Amino acid sequence: MNPTLASRLANIAPFHVMELAKLATELERSGRSIIHMGIGEPDFTAPAPVIEAASRAMADGRLQYTAAIGIPALREAISAHYKDVYKLDVAPSRIIVTAGASAALLLACAALVEKNAEVLMPDPSYPCNRHFVAAFEGRAKMIPSGPEQRFQLSDETVREHWGVDTRGVLLASPSNPTGTSIPHDELASIVSTVRGKGGFTIVDEIYQGLTYDEAPYSALSLGDDVIVINSFSKYFNMTGWRLGWLVVPPSMVAPIEKLAQNLFICASGIAQHAGVACFAPESIAIYEERKAEFKRRRDYIVPALRQLGFKVPVTPDGAFYVYADCSALSEDADRLTIDMLHQAGVVLVPGLDFGPSTARQYIRLSYATSMDNLEEAVLRLERFFAAYAKRV
């Protein structure tokens, strides 16, 4: 007899991005050439100084458990990074090192989300964000947020949708899937409104290092009560190392540490020692070169998509995604992405994962792949749509 599963699983939807990736892998095994522009994973890997730091840690036998909130050297390096890049004094004592940004979000939701608590977030949003809320029996209230709002919440929409059960907001700037940021003044207004209602503001900043058109800023500039999530996966190109961090108000450090001790013990010790090297000047120089390459790819693929017939109503200013309206090409984004995979060998993902308001109309493209792959993908899609138009 199989065990009875917890009812909360009914609130967790499958991650269609990963399902499509599995299908693409099966096609590759059969001999097909597939260009992957679905999963948001940099094609760059950790640079030499980071690899060398990991090797030294292993050679020196620094493989034990660490403190649940991270090694002091890494917390201090992150603090110095906020000072260097954002001109902010963020005490190392407020920084909690985590097993990726996912663990950081899990800890934040474990500390703040109670049963039936409502958390506001934009539709579209990264799907796991609402599932973290659901895992603690809260309710994500997805607010349709179109291109006129840069696919982000505004202070006006927060005020309009705040209800008796609302406890906070969960935002991302720049965002997955849209690559758009919240303007600083708008975010400041949101934080002020939420603070006035006694709620919490969580801001996912894992793509903040990949901001292209304006000087980057951190939501931490808006007050010590703002909770910020960050990661070594995107700007620092360390997806498989599972390393991230969480910045919390001083009053939350001890409760979060207690949760981290019980849920994770600690983040990978090797990854933490390697992470310190991410902030060395030679490493930052490499990351900035790679950031420039991501911008070059964005500046190629956005007009190329428009030429293919997609609408890109908001040019992404960060991350490595384009959220494109495919309604002029198809009435069903999900069906279109499956056809593009099978017939063109190109992986894009439908809006299905990111919220109901854009599920059938939008697709997400990740340009975290080489320029050669992007150019080849555009050629394949040109041929695909020429034949597609004849069929329909």
Image: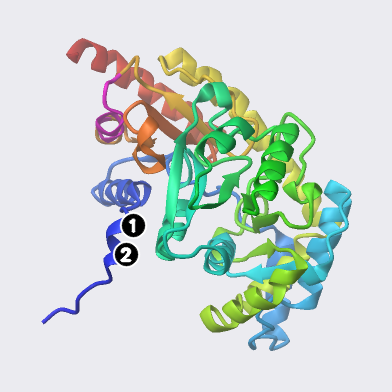
Q: Is residue 38 left or right of residue 287?
A: left
Is any atom of residue 42 visible in this view?
Answer: yes
Residue position marked by numbered label 2 in the rendering:
8
Amino acid marked by disc 1:
Ile
Counting from the top left corner in percent of width and height, residue 28 is at 30, 47
Q: Which mark is residue 243?
A: none
Counting from the top left corner in percent of width and height, residue 379 is at 41, 22
Q: Is residue 270 left or right of residue 18?
A: right
The residue at the point 24 percent across, 31 percent down is 335
Taken as a whole, is the magenta stretch helix, strand or loop?
A: helix
The residue carrying pointer 2 sits among few (fewer than 14), some (14 to 19) or many (20 or more) residues within 10 Å by Cα, namely: few
Tell me where the magenta segment starts and ends, as one range: 330-339
Q: Name the residue nearer the viewer: 220 or 298.
A: 220
Is residue 235 a member of the stretch shown in magenta?
Answer: no
Counting from the top left corner in percent of width and height, residue 156 is at 60, 30
> Can you say which quadrant of the picture contains the N terminus?
bottom left
Reply above or below: 322 against 8: above
Q: Quadrant of residue 154?
A: top right
The residue at the point 54 percent across, 17 percent down is 303
Badge 2 marks a residue whose secondary structure is: helix
The way the protein has been coloured in the rendering is: rainbow
Q: Is residue 204 left or right of residue 338?
A: right
Q: Which mark is residue 12?
A: 1
Amino acid marked by disc 2:
Arg
Q: Name the residue nearer the viewer: 377 or 197.
A: 197
Mark 1 in CB contact with mark 2 (< 8 angstroms): yes
Badge 1 marks a residue whose secondary structure is: loop
